[in-house]
Amino acid sequence: MAADAPTPRYVVASSPDRPSLRRVEPYAFTYTMHCKGRWQGREPLEVFAAEFKMNPPAYYEEALADGRITVNDRSVEPGQILKNGDVIRHRAHRHEPPVPGARIGVVGLSPKVLAVDKPPGLPMHPCGSYHFNTLTSLLREDFAPRSFRADADGAARGRRREIVLAAMTLDRRGSSKTGRRGAAAATRLVRERR
């Protein structure tokens, strides 16, 4: 599903008696999907009610009626049947669950590899309810200016940059939860890619 994702606005809230949480302010998001084979010959309401159970069927009826769900960028007509090649868009208001607000520590950095200490409870990449509150999205925010400039320079010289991301969670003693071998493997990965 592609999206017209806005720039996220993060809020990290902490208090002395609770660990900090990183929240993303609610935002409008457009899901874009292509008609799957199993959807062909069915009405959009039937598909949404059966396949996307995070909302009740009444929500989808309302979204179809007011144009938040479109097929081929047009409002859905009553009785319309989905067919091969249809592009379905659903504009929704998203609220992402909070994630730990712990700082993402850099364990190793080279021109080709970034190894980080991923906080537990932080998803690796966008999935399910998470789009911006993920490790890859947060790193993109932190490293975007450098990465895009480096990629543009490499492309101008006819080279393609390869960035490898290795993530692990370290415990309080600085040991990897995968053990010393996991930490050593990440360190070797950083050294070998230099």
Image (cartoon, helix red, strand yellow):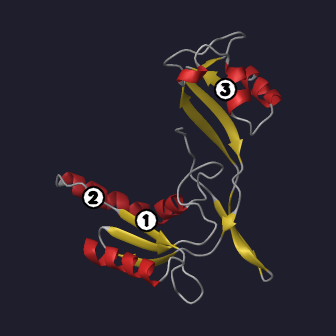
Q: What residue occupies the far top of the structure in this picture?
A: 79
Name the front one of labels 1 and 2: 2
Tell me which numbered mark, 3 or 1, is placed earlier along the sequence: 3
Question: Disc 3 versus disc 1: distance between alpha carbons?
Answer: 34 Å
Q: Earlier in the sequence, mark 1 or mark 2?
A: 1
The amino acid at mark 1 is: Phe
Q: Is residue 73 left or right of residue 185?
A: right
Report the residue marked by disc 1.
143
- Name which of mark 3 and mark 2 comes first in the sequence: 3
- Taking the spot 70% from the left edge, 61% from the top edge, the residue there is 98
Rendered residue at 28%/54% (across/down): 152
Query: Where is residue 122 drawn, in percent x and y?
Result: 60, 65
Above or below residue 144? Residue 175 is: below
Image position of 11 (left or right of 37): right
Q: Which mark is residue 69?
A: 3
Q: Which mark is residue 161?
A: 2
